[in-house]
Image: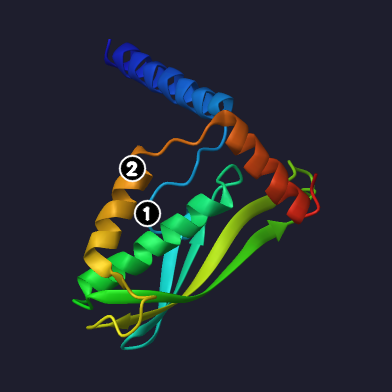
Amino acid sequence: MRSQIGLAAVSVCAVVLAGCSGASSAIGPSVASYGASNIFSPVGYDQTQIDETHYKVTATGSEVTPPARVEKLATARAAEIGADMKLDYFKVASVQHGATCTAKEQGYKGPSTAGIARPNVVLDVIYSKEATDPGFKPSKATFEALSGELATESVSPEDQQAANQDILARCGQS
């Protein structure tokens, strides 16, 4: 009896997991949301501190994330850093749009791996306690505004498709 219950539980789990994996492949990639990137999910933001008031902020989107949203993700993170560090103002000194591209690889006696094509942006950010020129924005207010926009903003399927075609072309994968 116990083995039948155990077998039934394993079967239910297998069905649930199969359903989840099928649903995610039917939906496809999603637009990048606000969050840190990591080894398992390269989509999101990352930062490198250059000195006390200078950071490099990077954001990477999924293949269907428009470049403007990727820049907004990076800018929101830049503003959040300023707010967290009690530096009232920040200024984006430079913006570099780019792409992360890898070619499709054929597997040896196994499946091949798909090529990667993701938009990214790198911001050079300067922080200050005071707005020393008109280019400085208030850190806390900017973060609150951008994080609200990112949470409620939706990207139309047409814009997602256009973003995908653009990044594939930039990576030579179209």
Q: Is residue 55 above or below residue 155?
A: below
Colour pattern of the rendering? rainbow
* Label 1 or label 2, whichever comes before in sequence order: 1
Using the rendered view, name the quadrant where residue 78 is placed: bottom left
Q: Is residue 71 above or below residue 49?
A: above
Asked whether the viewer can see residue 103, the reply is no
| Mark 1, other Cα within 10 Å: few <14 / some 14–19 / many ≥20 | few
In the image, residue 144 lies at what x, y percent?
25, 55
Disc 1 marks which amino acid? Gly
Using the rendered view, name the quadrant where residue 44 is placed: bottom left
Q: Disc 1 and disc 2: Cα gap in Å?
A: 11 Å
- Select label 1 or label 2 by which is in front: 2
Position of the C terminus by quadrant: top right
Q: Observer-nearest residue: 68 or 8?
A: 68
Query: The residue tagged with tag 2: helix, strand or loop?
Result: helix
In the image, residue 1 lies at what x, y percent?
28, 10
**Residue at horizontal 36 percent and vertical 13 percent from the top:** 8
Instruction: Name the residue carrying label 2.
Output: 151
Query: The residue tagged with tag 1: helix, strand or loop?
Result: loop
37 lies left or right of 4: right
Disc ID at residue 35: 1
In the image, residue 106 lies at what x, y percent?
80, 48
**Residue at horizontal 49 percent and vertical 50 percent from the top:** 69
**Residue at horizontal 41 percent and vertical 46 percent from the top:** 33
Asked whether the viewer can see residue 135, the reply is yes
